Image (cartoon, rainbow, N blue to C red):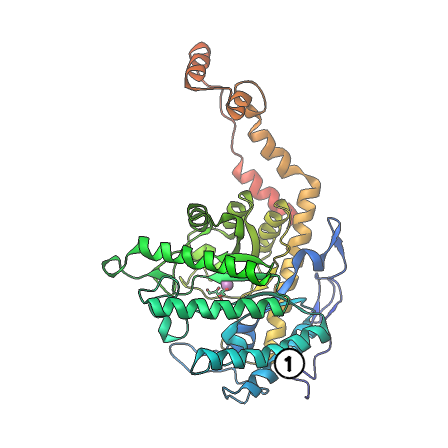
Amino acid sequence: MPQAFPEIQKIKYEGPQSKNPLAFRWYNENETVEGKSMKEHLRFAVVYWHTFRGTGSDPFGAATMVRPWDDGSNSVENAQRRARVAFEFCEKLGAPFYAFHDRDVAPEGSTLAESNKNLDAVVRVLKEEQQRTGIKLLWGTANLFSNPRFMHGAATTCNADVFAFAAAQVKKCLEVTKELGGVNYVFWGGREGYQNLLNTNMKRELDHLARFFHMAVAYAKEIGFSGQFLIEPKPKEPTKHQYDSDAAACLNFLRAYELLPYFKLNIETNHATLAGHTMQHELEYAGMQGALGSIDANTGDLLLGWDTDQFPTNIYLTTEIMWTILKWGGLAPGGVNFDAKVRRESFEPIDLFHAHIGGMDAFARGLKIAATIRAEGEFDRLLKQRYSSFDGGIGADIESGKADFKKLEAYILAKGEAAPNQSGRQEMLEHLLNRYI
Ligand code: XUL
Ligand code: CO
């Protein structure tokens, strides 16, 4: 097969002074940061759906990205050729991982049996290409939202047959993810949510969702799939109220249904902002509960209220993300997965390289800045000092459970008034952050 990107060589690290747009200025995969290579910290992944299936169509216009390697058909041969292109791309980019939905890689047939057969035919090529290149599957997932049968949801549908179909599809996708050595398996809610409570039994739907997840856990155990299960929170789109709305809601659901030991979270920047949070908030929340699994790296547009899935280039954002990830011990077996798409005006294949190189460099730079911040320890010292009243005396009694309301009342009655507060120093801290960026 001829190369899809003959004019592109393997993208190299050329250092911050380089003016070559097709080179890394910060991502130097073997450079050590906090005792680990950048490659090990970042574990970059390319998504199949946007990068190899994105067409640039929108509600107002047709596809702009007509790829020379794609014959436009829904054939298995076309899907197999696309798979080889995907690996040529990841290999030249130097991305160690990729991620897919079942229906991204292989065409859906008119029955489940036909879809499974198509999937097997493409998985053979994916496996061959993984072996040839050493590129690994970060995660697999089932598309339980595109086909019209899932209009009311999949695990939270009102139609029991659709629930059964979704279960059968996830069963196959788990088998395939195992076959390809996938290190995680993702559940993004798709259409699991509702538009209107007049036609929705929320309790029943959530019970069904939990039942579905327990079945997935049991089947993974049965087939010996040891990858990490991840839930990807998102608050809205396509439904008005997605059940997995944010990290806190997901963790509450998992805890309530005794699923917490089996799942971590896949946190996505644009989903965090749609939830009215920052990415850092979501990461911190997941991290402090031991549930930080992986991230979908992208960004939204602050002037647009939907999931624009843009490539991240903002160094503040990547610094905050990597700072939080380092704080909670890193991502593995997760990774930095670019769930991002080029704009429809960026229709040339080379734009896929520009987009990923920019994102990878932004993350590499964020990682280095975060490591410097941590090494200097100034923020840590200031944070520790802010809570120092809990390090001894009455504060230590509160934290250790030695104090109760009566003891605290006696303490304050004797003292008359609480000790004076200290300034929060927000502006000083924001200014301090700029010193590192
Ligand atoms: C949708 C989204 C998905 C998941 C995988 O907003 O982020 O692409 O990452 O299903
Ligand atoms: Co995503």
Residue closest to the far front: 222
The answer to whether 398 appears left or right of 199 in the picture is: right
Q: Quadrant of the N terminus?
A: bottom right
Residue under the point 56% across and 30% down: 386
Q: Report the front residue among 304 and 170.
A: 170
**Does residue 411 lie above or below 107 as drawn?**
above
Q: Report the front residue among 158 and 54.
A: 158
The answer to whether 262 appears left or right of 25 in the picture is: left
Image quadrant assignment for residue 306: bottom left
Q: Which residue is mark 1?
A: 84
Provide residue 152's location: percent of width, then percent of height. 33, 67
Q: Report the front residue among 10 and 76.
A: 76
Mark 1 CB within 8 Å of ligand 1: no
Q: Secondary structure at mark 1?
A: helix
The answer to whether 5 appears left or right of 261 in the picture is: right
The answer to whether 414 appears left or right of 6 in the picture is: left
Provide residue 167's location: percent of width, then percent of height. 44, 66
Provide residue 215's location: percent of width, then percent of height. 46, 59
Provide residue 27's location: percent of width, then percent of height. 70, 62
